[in-house]
Image (tube, rainbow, N blue to C red):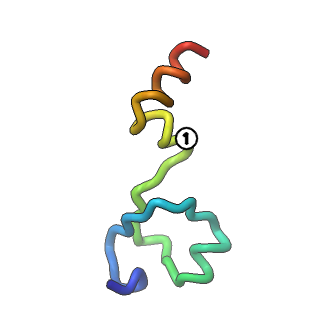
């Protein structure tokens, strides 16, 4: 359960460089996030994005 030992880190909070350094996440580890993912995984955000 330690993020330092994981190959893939699944999280619901935003991970930036400061968080990576604090937790000890390395470059070879993957995080389940990419920019603006909420607009793709939540239908109401996807609809808002399409209408813009």
The vertical placement of 40 against 48, above or below, is below
Q: Residue at x 57, y 74 (%)?
A: 20
Q: Residue at x 46, y 28 (%)?
A: 44
The vertical placement of 2 against 39, above or below, is below
Give neighbour class at mark 1: few <14, some 14-19, many 20+ (Cα, 10 Å): few
- 17 displayed left or right of 13: right
- 21 displayed left or right of 2: right
Q: Residue at x 56, y 64 (%)?
A: 15
The image shows residue 22 at horizontal and vertical percentages of 61, 82
Disc 1 is placed on an element classified as loop
According to the picture, the residue beneath numbered tag 1 turns out to be: 36
Q: Quadrant of residue 2?
A: bottom left
Q: Quadrant of residue 17?
A: bottom right
- 27 and 8: which is toward the camera: 8
Task: State which quarter of the image contains the C terminus.
Answer: top right
Q: Residue at x 50, y 77 (%)?
A: 25
- Residue closest to the far right: 18
Task: State which quarter of the image contains the N terminus.
Answer: bottom left
The vertical placement of 24 against 11, above or below, is below
- Residue closest to the far front: 44
Marker count (numbered) = 1
- 26 displayed left or right of 3: right
- 7 displayed left or right of 33: left
- 27 and 50: which is toward the camera: 50
The image shows residue 19 at horizontal and vertical percentages of 61, 73
């Amino acid at each position: 359960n330690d993020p330092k030992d994981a190959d893939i880190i699944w999280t619901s909070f935003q991970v930036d460089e400061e968080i990576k350094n604090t937790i000890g996440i390395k470059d070879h580890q993957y995080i389940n996030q990419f920019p603006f993912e909420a607009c793709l995984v939540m239908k109401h955000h996807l609809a808002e994005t399409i209408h813009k």
